[in-house]
Structure formats: structure tokens, C-alpha cells
Amino acid sequence: MRTVLRGLAELTVTAGLILALFVGYLAWGTGEYTRRQQGDLRDDLERQWSADRVRRLADVQPAGSGTAPAPAAGQALAILRVPRFGASYRYAVVEGVSVADLRKGPGHYPGTAGPGEIGNMVIAGHRTTYGGPFERNDELARGDEILVDTATTTYVYRVTGRTVVRPSGIEVTAPVPGRPGRKPRKAMLTLTTCHPKFSAAYRLVVFAELAGRRARAAGV
């Protein structure tokens, strides 16, 4: 019996070490991957924005519609900032919400509005793994600013509320959140993430509306 108990104790310790290593990987390993990806995405975005500025100064537009082409899946399209979370909170938002896309950072739902556009710009993000960009979204309160930077413009959204829905509650991603089929009249922003932490049972959803826009400051 003593041998059996000793064996069980050793197995318990081993299992605990394995679990600790796994949790450490989720907290640090996946976050390190996202950190590297974010660095590359922000560098690519700055190069793209610099090229856009050169084209505007030269009065040269890309061929086609006269606007820069939409980003491909996995490419960055904007920078997301939340003053409540501090000056260091700065994430490149990628186009797409696939598993691979969200490992890079917050992802823009294809087909939803773009920065500053009438309609609902929907962005999803991890809450605990891969850097946990939306870890603190439950702290956002009515009136808090959410900033979306593009090449020349910073769009200022203000939080209007938040809710918790089941994963099937896709009506929050409609052009008018919660009212599928209604024509939008405002520029809105919706952030979605898992809820509660370390679970995917529900979705925490933060709603915001465009409150203003200003020229993007250099170095932002």
C-alpha cells in the first residue's frame, strides 16, 4: 500500500508539473508568438502607410477604383488603441477571424464596416492566450475611448455599453447590432471575446459609436 501511495504521489507531482508547463506555454509561449507577429504587422503597416502618403503627395492613385486595395486575410488594416489600458496598448488589427488570423492579434470580421464607415465594424480577439489583447475588455465603461488609427486618420469611438451572449448570438455583428436587417445610420464598433476568462462558453461584447475623427499624429 505504501508503494502504491508513493507511486500515486509521484504521478500527481508529475501531472502538476506538466500542467504548470502547459499553463506557462499558454501564458508566455503563445504571447511571445503574437508579440513577434505584431511587430512584423506594425512594420508592414507603417511601410504601406508611408507609400500611401508618397502617392498622395505625388497625386498618384493606385490603379482601379482610386483607393488603396483592401488588405488580404491576415494582413493588417489598422491600429487599435484603448487609452484606459495605457499608452503601451497598441495592436495591429488583421483582416479575418480564422484561427491563424487571431493568433496574430485582433481580427476584423470580413464584410463588416471599415474604420469610420457607416455600419458596424466588428473586431474579435483572444482574452487569455496569444497575448490576450481583449483580456481587460470587461473593464471598459460607457464613455471610454477606443481609437482606430489608419494612414491619415484616428477614429474616436466611445463605449456605449456591453453585454454577454452565447456563441450563437451573431446578431451582435449585424450592421445595427442586435437588429439584423435594419439599415445602419451610424458608424459603430463592436469588440467580441470569450467569456469568462479561460472559457469559451459565452462571448463578452463591447459596443461603441463613432464620436469624432482627427488627423493621425506622427509616430502613433
Image (cartoon, rainbow, N blue to C red):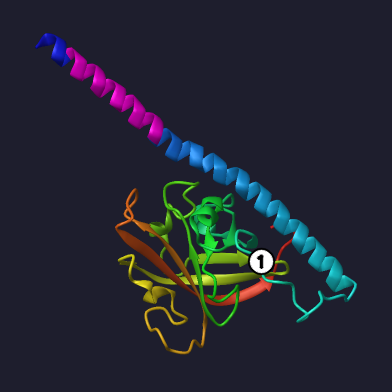
> For the point 50% across and 42% down, which residue is it?
30
Residue sticking out furthest to the right: 58
Tell me residue 59's x, y (percent).
88, 76
Dividing the picture into quarters, in which one does residue 176 lie? bottom left
Quadrant placement of the N terminus: top left
The residue indicated by pointer 1 is: 71
* Most foreground residue, 171 or 161: 171
Look at the picture and state if 26 lies above or below 94: above
Tell me residue 74's x, y (percent).
60, 58
Look at the picture and state if 54 lies above or below 1: below
Residue sticking out furthest to the top: 2
**Residue 219 appears in view:** no
Mark 1 residue type = Pro
Quadrant placement of the C terminus: bottom right
Tell me residue 192's x, y (percent).
43, 64
Q: Is residue 12 magenta?
A: yes
Residue sticking out furthest to the left: 1
Using residue 189 as the reference point, say whether residue 7 is left or right of it. left
Secondary structure mostly taken by the magenta-highlighted segment of the chain = helix
* Most foreground residue, 23 or 56: 23
Dividing the picture into quarters, in which one does residue 46 lie? bottom right
> For the point 36% across and 62% down, which residue is it?
204
Q: How many labels does the image show?
A: 1
Crowd band around label 1 with a 10 angstrom C-alpha radius: few (<14), some (14–19), many (20+): few
Which span of residues is magenta-colored?
A: 6-22
* Most foreground residue, 204 or 72: 72
SS under mark 1: loop
Tell me residue 171's x, y (percent).
38, 76
**Residue 106 appears in view:** yes
Q: Is residue 200 magenta?
A: no
